[in-house]
Image (cartoon, helix red, strand yellow):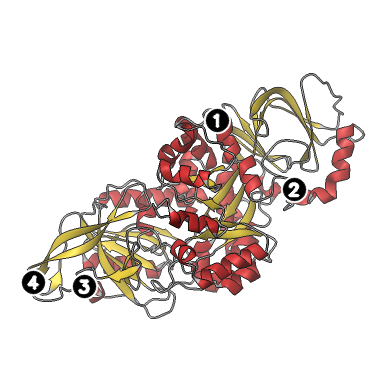
């Protein structure tokens, strides 16, 4: 059992006697919540008119309506007024970096929506800054009113031999990190071919995890549900969030895998994958709901896990079952259910007050027995460890040294760096191009005919050029290729958010615009930028922390992201949530075709291919 601190009250070791005394009635409670309807995730029932008795940041008693208790004058009384009382929501697979803010900004955004704990996989900052960067992010999160746990990244880089990252986390480094108190599991094992094939380094990482007696989480992106899936599960990996079809989710549930159904900003899998539950009679004890990658504007406009719950419920999942998937099930998977995941005696008083169960209408949020948010707004955030809004940037900047905010080590490329030449004198060529799939992580392998002028391949409508430059101070190598599906008609866009090695990624319709986009991104030390044909900046989102995260509050970043989305549209992009779709184009562990700084990768055969065969 992993014991969790209730803020300054510490673990149950420091408060067990006090809790027992309050439960007996020999000591006054600090807070009492009256007239609530308890969402009992243990039994799957609703208990009306209950009273929760709180002390030391925990629940001492759950009093039924058949029993009256004397409430001392000094005890704070909170009237739930019939609202549903649910445990704080727990995200079992999330990348803080995808929200484009650091731990402080993420906390500021998600806690008022009901998320009170998160198991993050910081492999984005890990790919740029290694264990040192991960440690900095965890240290920033340590005293915030969002309980942050770490699953240590397993694949840095994600595809060894196919890309170049800013760091490497090998089995020895994982073994070191597993000794940190806030590391509770191995992060998603994306090298599923290595697991299946018995790669020594991959299985050394798994062995280190099992020796530390913590779980290994998975990333099985293959559609093969036969022997390869069995080989993956037989390795000891116990969770996976990569299901995109009903059949995949069901196959994993039937193998005892904790199946994390994902609903991020771009990856909207739940309407399909939830059918594994709603169209069957399978038990849901291993069902989890996760966000994985969520952009800041999604959080500020639509919420976090509350949004995911709404989608699941709207697609037929029973509301209590849905809440179990982000509370009790989540806590049980990571072995923190002694403290989190339910509202029962001894548990930490992380409580979500809901006006409506089906729409997951969050009205108030309590963390460690203290009300911290109401109607989506913080209540005296500085009292619970969150800096005041006007001190947010200064607080974040103090957490990261200059070397972590100056990470784009690349000379500005010229137009010739983007040229793709034909292999011999031809008027046209047939090129291998990545075809994006809207709202899904995969790509297709497309063959497109392109014209050639003076030996240089030119673009046609619906075809964009893509380039990935190594930006970590290495050899500045570059991979070039083509992509379809964005709809760009002009200009170029660029980002240092380019999973998972986070090199400098440029997509554009002309070499000149791509040069300007790369130059601007270097100037601002990373982030996102959109450039028109004249080379002017239409919108940008500076992300100075590792080239991945902003030091600004999440609402500021959200506004900038919305302007960036408008700039994408002005350039002709027709894709919903294009940023995550674009940022995954270099991720050489997801089918079917990807581009890294080393070149175009067939991620089915795991071999390089030429953009022009």
- As displayed, is residue 302 above or below residue 12? above
Local crowd size for mark 3, using a 10 Å CA cut-off: few (<14), some (14–19), many (≥20): some
Of mark 2 and mark 3, the one earlier in the sequence is: 2
Q: Residue tagged by mark 4?
A: 426
Of mark 2 and mark 1, the one earlier in the sequence is: 2
Q: Residue 72, how many percent across, how many down? A: 87, 29
Q: Secondary structure at mark 3?
A: loop
Q: Compute the Cα span from label 2 to label 1.
A: 27 Å
Asked whether 236 or 449 is in front, the reply is 236
- Which numbered mark, 4 or 2, is in the foreground of this view? 4
Q: Compute the Cα span from label 3 to label 1.
A: 54 Å
Of mark 4 and mark 3, the one earlier in the sequence is: 3
Q: Residue tagged by mark 1?
A: 319
In-image side of 415 versus 65 (left or right): left
Q: Residue tagged by mark 2?
A: 6
Local crowd size for mark 2, using a 10 Å CA cut-off: few (<14), some (14–19), many (≥20): many
Of mark 4 and mark 2, the one earlier in the sequence is: 2
Q: Residue tagged by mark 3?
A: 419
Q: Secondary structure at mark 2?
A: loop
């Amino acid at each position: 059992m992993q014991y969790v601190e209730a803020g300054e009250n510490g673990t149950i070791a420091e408060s067990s006697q006090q809790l027992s005394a309050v439960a007996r009635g020999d000591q006054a409670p600090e807070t009492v919540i009256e007239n609530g309807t308890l969402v009992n995730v243990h039994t799957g029932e609703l208990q009306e008119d209950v009273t929760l008795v709180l002390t030391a940041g925990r629940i001492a008693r759950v009093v039924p309506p058949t029993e009256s208790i004397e409430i001392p004058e000094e005890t704070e009384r909170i009237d739930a007024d019939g609202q549903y009382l649910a445990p704080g929501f727990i995200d079992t697979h999330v990348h803080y970096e995808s929200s484009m803010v650091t731990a402080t900004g993420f906390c500021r955004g998600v806690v008022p929506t009901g998320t009170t704990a998160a198991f993050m996989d910081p492999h984005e900052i890990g790919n740029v800054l290694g264990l040192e960067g991960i440690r900095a992010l965890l240290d920033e999160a340590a005293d915030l009113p969002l309980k942050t746990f770490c699953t240590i990244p397993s694949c840095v880089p994600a595809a060894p031999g196919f890309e170049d990252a800013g760091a490497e986390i090998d089995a020895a480094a994982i073994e070191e990190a597993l000794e940190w108190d806030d590391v509770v599991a191995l992060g998603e094992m994306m090298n599923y071919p290595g697991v299946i094939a018995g790669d020594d380094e991959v299985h050394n990482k798994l062995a280190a995890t099992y020796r530390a007696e913590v779980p290994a989480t998975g990333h099985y992106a293959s559609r093969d549900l036969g022997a390869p899936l069995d080989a993956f599960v037989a390795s000891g990996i116990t969770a996976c969030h990569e299901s995109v079809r009903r059949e995949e989710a069901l196959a994993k549930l039937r193998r005892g895998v904790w199946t994390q159904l994902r609903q991020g900003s771009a990856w909207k899998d739940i309407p399909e994958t939830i059918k594994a539950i709603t169209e069957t009679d399978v038990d849901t004890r291993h069902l989890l709901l996760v966000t994985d990658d969520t952009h800041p504007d999604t959080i500020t406009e639509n919420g976090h896990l509350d949004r995911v719950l709404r989608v699941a419920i709207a697609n037929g999942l029973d509301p209590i079952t849905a809440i179990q998937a982000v509370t009790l099930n989540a806590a049980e998977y990571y072995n923190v259910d002694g403290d989190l995941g339910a509202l029962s005696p001894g548990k930490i008083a992380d409580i979500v007050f809901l006006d409506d169960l089906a729409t997951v209408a969050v009205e108030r949020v309590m963390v460690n027995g203290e009300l911290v948010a109401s109607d989506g707004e913080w209540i005296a955030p500085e009292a619970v460890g969150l800096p005041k809004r006007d001190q947010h940037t200064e607080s974040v900047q103090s957490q990261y040294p200059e070397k972590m905010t100056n990470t784009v080590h690349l000379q500005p490329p010229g137009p010739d760096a983007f040229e793709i030449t034909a292999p011999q004198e031809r008027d046209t060529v047939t090129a291998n191009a990545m075809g994006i799939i809207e709202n899904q992580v995969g790509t297709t392998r497309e063959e497109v005919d392109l014209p050639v002028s003076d030996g240089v391949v030119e673009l046609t409508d619906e075809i964009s050029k893509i380039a990935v430059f190594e930006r970590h101070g290495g050899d500045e190598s570059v991979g070039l290729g083509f992509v379809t599906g964005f709809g760009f008609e002009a200009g170029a866009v660029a980002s240092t958010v380019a999973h998972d090695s986070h090199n400098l990624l440029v997509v554009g319709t002309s070499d000149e615009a791509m040069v300007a986009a790369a130059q601007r991104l270097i100037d601002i030390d990373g982030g996102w930028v959109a450039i028109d044909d004249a080379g002017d900046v239409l919108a940008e989102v500076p992300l100075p922390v590792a080239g991945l995260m902003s030091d600004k509050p999440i609402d500021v970043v959200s506004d900038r992201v919305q302007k960036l989305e408008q700039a994408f549209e002005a350039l002709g992009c027709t894709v919903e949530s294009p940023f995550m779709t674009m940022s995954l184009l270099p991720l050489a562990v997801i089918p079917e075709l990807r581009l890294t700084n080393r070149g175009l990768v067939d991620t089915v055969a795991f071999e390089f291919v030429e953009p022009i065969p």
